[in-house]
Amino acid sequence: QQQVRQSPQSLTVWEGETAILNCSYEDSTFNYFPWYQQFPGEGPALLISIRSVSDKKEDGRFTIFFNKREKKLSLHITDSQPGDSATYFCAASANNNNAPRFGAGTKLSVKP
Amino acid sequence: EAAVTQSPRNKVAVTGGKVTLSCNQTNNHNNMYWYRQDTGHGLRLIHYSYGAGSTEKGDIPDGYKASRPSQENFSLILELATPSQTSVYFCASGGGLGASAETLYFGSGTRLTVL
């Protein structure tokens, strides 16, 4: 069973629009939530992360919104660019076991 | 720059054969991980290690063994490969110091096809 769930599986937006990627989890011990970005033929790379003590984390055009009570988070990409086209993975880990668990990913396509 | 190198980049194996996937990291990280990536499943954790000589089972360890002979090297072993193990395998290291302690650094992946 997937401990981390992502939706949608794929998403297409136009250049300049805001893309919203969703993530949810079940294990209440998870307290660290990184998002990784993966381009074809490459390994994933850290994009942005948030800890459960925060409800928002911003880095340029990328923002994570976190709702601990509902065990949900989302990644917002504002002013989407064609170069943002990639697969985005939400992950989660807990202090007592640092092996991160990943969701199934959202494939984002940004059309010019 | 953190570096994780996987070999081979591509591998074709026969059913029932033994396959060894290798991973080397120059980050001096304590933790190393093996994931497989399949469409619809994302990245699933197979085995991981907290240091030389240690290995831990992840979520899908059946059919796989792991070996961590040194800080730098972490291998994934398929003793009897099956077609269901056809996938892209990623190695990662983590557990560095400071702000990047929980960041994983991934290799470029090994595409394994079992015929």
Image (tube, helix red, strand yellow):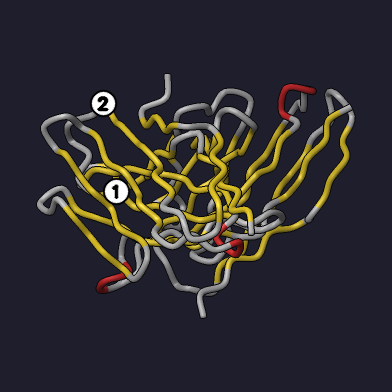
Task: Report the side of B66 relative to B9 (left or right).
Answer: left
Residue A33, label in figure? 1
Mark pair 2, 1: CA separation: 13 Å
Instruction: Locate the N terminus of chain A by quadrant.
Output: top left
Image-quadrant location for residue A30: top left
Question: Label 1 sits on what residue type?
Answer: Phe
x then y, percent, for residue A5:
39, 29
Q: Secondary structure at mark 2?
A: loop
Q: Residue furthest top?
A: A1
The chain containing the residue under callout 2 comes to A
**Mark closest to the chain's N terminus, 2 or 1:** 2
Image-quadrant location for residue B4: bottom right
Residue that mark 2 sits on: A26
Number of numbered discs present? 2
x then y, percent, for residue B56:
42, 39
x then y, percent, for residue A91:
38, 44
